[in-house]
């Protein structure tokens, strides 16, 4: 009989309500309950803060007390020197703790630790788990530097990253699309994020409401969505768009006002009861310029709400089968986005058929299925005892 598998995870923190934290928590809770793994999680920031998503009491949380977040208000030179000092402290403390615990496998969420994790002498196999896509990961975009310097630094970072990734026992990405970008590597596996929930009943799709979800950032493309909604609202003034998310709404509120959409486009705050909002909606729109693996897309499809999505890198093309369980449109094409929304507004039967297919197809991302893929990966690299 095999000994219980011991895993260590490394992540900056667990106190913030974002996708990476939610996915990790869901997976490790399942691992300890269903597979009886022993799990340790190491965090560098947020000492004294409780995890936003509850952890199973069997999971051991270790605070390394590095506090990288505290350096970002410093001037550039001070920040650089402080970062290097904290990075050395991070390596020393993590290495010491891993040597005490002796995990079988250490999983990096590919943040700052990927720069040194392969050098640690704790004896564990090292696995990397990336929650972004290559096109936007390790890109230097500080506008204080000229473009050629930004590109040069990005190329240097990418080269260092590839050297570190090659040394891992396995490197896991979220989509087949993203896997195709890492052509230098031969240790890649694709394991998608799991669904956060799967409701007992599907949405009825009768309400004249379109929904979008995400933080009010450039990445999410809500400026593109609002522009598209101007076209939709002219044809279907009885329909409304609700965008749920935190962040600075100033620019988007100005757009809504300037385009005369105040009566049909509403910018709502983020909510813990987002599932209820999916249930109230009939169409979901993903207007992102880029993604890693859009959790909200799987969530809304679980409710049987058909999506209209840009073909942004990466994620939508791994989840949506165009014309079957949703619609894919050219990335950044505002008119196509508007046309896709109008198509589902105008064709009740097609909207409901796509919603039904979406709910069925997304079951492949059930937590049970995703957890089994991780179990198979761990067992495939685990040394024979």
Image (cartoon, rainbow, N blue to C red):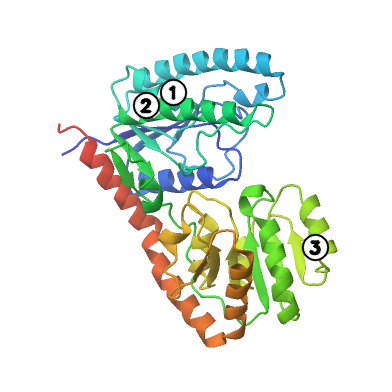
Q: In which quarter of the image is residue 230?
A: bottom right
Q: Residue at x 76, y 47 (%)?
A: 248
Q: In which quarter of the image is the C terminus?
A: top left
Q: In which quarter of the image is residue 245?
A: bottom right
Q: Is residue 275 above or below residue 36?
A: below
Q: Is residue 282 visible?
A: no
Looking at marks 3 and 1 on the same chain, the residue that comes earlier in the sequence is marked by 1
Q: Which of 360 and 219 is in front in this view?
A: 219
Q: Name the residue under label 3.
A: 256
Looking at marks 1 and 2 on the same chain, the residue that comes earlier in the sequence is marked by 1
Q: In which quarter of the image is residue 378?
A: top left
Q: Nearer the viewer, residue 343 or 50?
A: 343
Q: Mark 2 points at which residue?
A: 164
Secondary structure beneath disc 2?
helix
Q: Position of residue 151 (x, y in %)?
A: 54, 31
Is mark 1 in CB contact (under 8 Å) with mark 2? yes
Q: How many labels does the image show?
A: 3
Q: Which of 335 and 201 is in front in this view?
A: 335
Q: Nearer the viewer, residue 296 or 379?
A: 296
Q: Name the residue under label 1.
A: 115
Which residue of the protein is positioned furthest toward the front in this rendering? 148
Q: Position of residue 212 (x, y in %)?
A: 64, 63
Q: In this view, does 2 lie above or below 243?
A: above
Q: Can residue 34 be seen in this view?
A: yes
Q: Residues within 10 Å of mark 2 (few under 14, many from 20)?
A: some
Find the distance from the CA under tag 2 to the CA under tag 3. Answer: 46 Å
Looking at marks 2 and 3 on the same chain, the residue that comes earlier in the sequence is marked by 2
């Amino acid at each position: 009989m095999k000994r219980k598998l011991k895993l260590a995870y490394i992540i900056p923190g667990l106190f913030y309500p974002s996708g990476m934290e939610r996915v990790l928590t869901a997976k490790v809770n399942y691992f300890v309950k269903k597979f009886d793994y022993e799990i340790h999680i190491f965090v560098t920031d947020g000492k004294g803060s409780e995890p936003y998503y509850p952890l199973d009491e069997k999971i051991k949380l270790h605070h390394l007390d590095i506090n990288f977040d505290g350096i970002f208000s410093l001037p550039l030179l001070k920040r650089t020197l402080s970062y290097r000092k904290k990075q050395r402290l991070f390596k020393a403390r993590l290495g010491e703790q891993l040597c005490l615990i002796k995990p079988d496998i250490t999983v990096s969420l590919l943040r700052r630790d990927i720069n040194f994790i392969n050098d640690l002498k704790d004896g564990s196999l090292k696995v990397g788990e990336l929650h972004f896509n290559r096109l936007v990961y390790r890109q230097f975009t500080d506008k204080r530097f000229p473009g050629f310097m930004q590109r040069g630094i990005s190329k240097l970072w990418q080269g260092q990253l590839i050297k570190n990734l090659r040394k891992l026992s396995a490197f896991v990405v979220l989509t087949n699309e993203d896997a195709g970008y890492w052509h230098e590597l031969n240790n890649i596996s694709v394991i998608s994020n799991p669904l956060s929930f799967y409701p007992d009943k599907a949405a009825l799709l009768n309400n004249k409401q379109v929904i979008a979800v995400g933080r009010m950032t450039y990445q999410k493309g809500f400026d593109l969505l609002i522009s598209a909604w101007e076209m939709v609202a002219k044809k279907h003034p009885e329909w409304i768009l609700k965008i749920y998310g935190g962040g600075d709404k100033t620019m988007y509120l100005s757009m809504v006002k300037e385009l005369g959409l105040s009566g049909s486009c509403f910018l709502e705050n983020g909510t813990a009861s987002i599932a209820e909002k999916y249930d109230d909606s009939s169409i979901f729109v993903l207007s992102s310029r880029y993604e890693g693996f859009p959790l909200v897309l799987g969530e809304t499809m679980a409710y049987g709400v058909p999506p209209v999505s840009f073909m942004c890198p990466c994620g939508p093309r791994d989840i949506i089968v165009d014309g079957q369980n949703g619609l894919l449109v050219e990335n950044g094409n505002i008119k196509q986005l508007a046309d896709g929304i109008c198509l589902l507004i105008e064709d009740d039967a097609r909207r409901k058929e796509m919603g039904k297919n979406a709910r069925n197809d997304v079951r492949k991302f059930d937590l049970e299925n995703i957890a089994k893929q991780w179990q198979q990966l761990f067992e495939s690299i685990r040394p024979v005892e």
